[in-house]
């Protein structure tokens, strides 16, 4: 039944009505561009960390209320939902933007650069929108305004999802897309599909990258505690050195991907990001702790890698006379683009950006908690170009860095894309 529905949708995309609506969207997007950029700059200048997006949420809620929507706040701590009801029967389309920033000190020379500081995990840190979530919020606010302006052309409802804590809730807290789903934003509103985008600093303005199936990796966290025996640094034979054994485990973990994983199927990554042991130079400590991340794009490979991490760590520890405690937390699933939905909506993106600018890309080993929506309903997630035209990706600062920069010229395409995806999906034959 679903395939038939998507086939009918594809047939609609070639009708005169579709072309007329697209023209209206283009005009509306041009009229709100200046406002969208102004919103983005304000949010960029005053960023907030995960589960602390109080001012950003208030700005969003006030905008949606001015548009006359039903607005729900305080979802998953600081999340905001706006419901635009056309008053006519039709599907419920979810559109999502994430709101949180990162503990990074901005180095970009902008008049609206962030100067915000806060305390994070006991340290004084800067706050920066170093992943582009400020652009996502501003784009979706623009989409909300346009779709409200042309409400008479809609069928069904649009649920605008402004989500906190995509970067992960602080330790000891829940949050993000997982918590929003658990609190019923999809089920309570009968959301049928969800569309989302992510600005990309390494993709040229005007271009869109997408991938059917798994587009972003699952992200899992592992902790390995190596239990040795403490001794004086001058007498290592009197103890069991957890630092040496931990170092061997770090190297051993790398062979799981390079020698024990079928990489022709999908990519995988195991990285140790933290290694903590000891208090002074002449004491071999009793224990060492390794903390890292696992990135996989295939559930079967994910299970195998988890099993091999535990086996490798424990075997290396045992060989050195120590023991190892291994804990693996499944944090974020693979972000999966529904195959049939992606195929059905591809003509919309190609019409909006130009077919030559819509590019199938390789999967990304970064992770996105948009995956929790995609686990519940068919979803489509794509990357929007934010790198200045003519610039080489080799010269562009990557995400999560102090020099991260987005060319605002790419934002109107994001507004038009989400508007067109919503309208085209709503106007499928029913």
Image (cartoon, grey):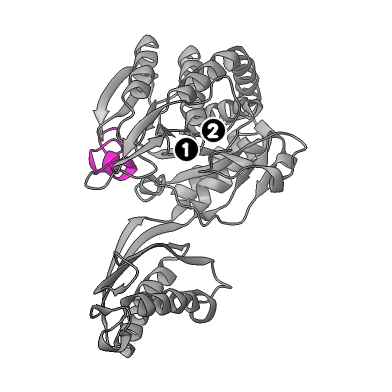
User: Is residue 412 rendered to the left or right of residue 339?
Assistant: right
Q: Rounded to the nearest whole Å, what is the CA distance between mark 2 and mark 1? A: 8 Å
> On the image, numbered disc 2 is attached to which residue?
421
Q: Is residue 376 above or below residue 294?
A: above
Q: Is residue 152 above or below residue 134?
A: above
Task: Based on the picture, tell me whether residue 58 belongs to the magenta stretch.
Answer: no
Percent coordinates x, y for residue 395 in the rendering: 70, 44
What is the secondary structure assignment of the residue under circle 2?
Answer: helix
Residue at 49% x, 81% y is 260
Q: Are marks 2 and 1 in contact (CB under 8 Å)?
A: yes
Q: Nearer the viewer, residue 245 or 194?
A: 245
Q: Is residue 176 above or below residue 276?
A: above
Which class describes the residues within 10 Å of circle 1: few (<14), some (14-19), or many (20+)? many
Percent coordinates x, y for residue 204 in the rendering: 69, 39
Which class describes the residues within 10 Å of circle 2: few (<14), some (14-19), or many (20+)? many
> On the image, numbered disc 1 is attached to which residue?
195
Residue span colored magenta: 174-189
Classify residue 243 by image quadrant.
bottom left
Is tag 2's residue or tag 1's residue first in the polypeptide sequence?
Answer: 1
Q: Nearer the viewer, residue 125 or 182?
A: 125
Q: For residue 154, say whether it is visible.
A: no
């Amino acid at each position: 039944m679903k395939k038939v529905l998507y086939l009918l949708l594809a047939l609609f995309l070639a009708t005169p009505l579709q072309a007329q609506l697209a023209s209206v969207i283009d005009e509306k997007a041009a009229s709100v561009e200046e406002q969208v950029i102004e919103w983005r700059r304000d949010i960029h200048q005053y960023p907030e960390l995960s589960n602390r997006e109080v001012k950003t949420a208030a700005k969003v809620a006030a905008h949606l209320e001015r548009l006359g929507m039903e607005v729900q706040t305080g979802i998953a701590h600081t999340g905001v939902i706006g419901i635009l009801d056309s008053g006519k029967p039709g599907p419920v389309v979810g559109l999502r933007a994430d709101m949180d920033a990162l503990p990074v000190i901005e180095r970009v020379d902008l008049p609206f650069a962030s100067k915000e500081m806060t305390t994070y995990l006991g340290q004084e840190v800067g706050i920066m929108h170093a992943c582009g979530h400020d652009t996502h919020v501003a784009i979706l606010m623009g989409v909300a305004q346009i779709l409200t302006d042309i409400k008479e052309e809609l069928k069904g409802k649009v649920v605008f999802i402004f989500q906190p804590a995509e970067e992960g809730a602080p330790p000891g807290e829940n949050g993000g897309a997982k918590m929003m789903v658990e609190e019923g934003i999809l089920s309570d509103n009968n959301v049928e599909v969800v569309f989302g985008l992510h600005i990309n600093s390494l993709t040229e303005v005007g271009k869109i990258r997408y991938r059917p199936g798994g587009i972003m990796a699952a992200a899992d966290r592992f902790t390995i505690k190596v239990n040795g025996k403490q001794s004086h640094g001058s007498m290592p034979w009197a103890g069991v050195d957890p630092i040496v054994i931990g170092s061997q485990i770090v190297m051993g973990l790398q062979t799981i991907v390079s020698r024990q994983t079928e990489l022709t199927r999908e990519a995988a990554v195991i990285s140790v990001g933290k290694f903590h042991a000891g208090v002074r130079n002449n004491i071999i400590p009793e224990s060492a702790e390794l903390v890292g991340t696992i990135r996989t794009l295939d559930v079967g490979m994910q299970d195998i890698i988890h099993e091999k991490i535990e086996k490798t760590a424990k075997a290396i520890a045992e060989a050195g006379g120590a023991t190892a405690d291994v804990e693996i937390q499944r944090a974020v699933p693979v972000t999966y683009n529904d195959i049939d939905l992606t195929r059905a909506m591809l003509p919309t993106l190609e019409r909006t950006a130009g077919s030559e600018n819509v590019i199938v890309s390789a999967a990304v080993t970064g992770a996105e908690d948009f995956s929790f929506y995609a686990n519940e309903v068919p979803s489509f997630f794509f990357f929007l170009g934010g790198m200045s035209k003519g610039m080489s990706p080799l010269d562009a600062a990557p995400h999560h860095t102090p020099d991260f920069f987005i060319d605002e010229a790419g934002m109107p395409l994001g507004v038009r894309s989400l508007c067109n995806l919503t309208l085209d999906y709503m106007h499928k034959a029913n």
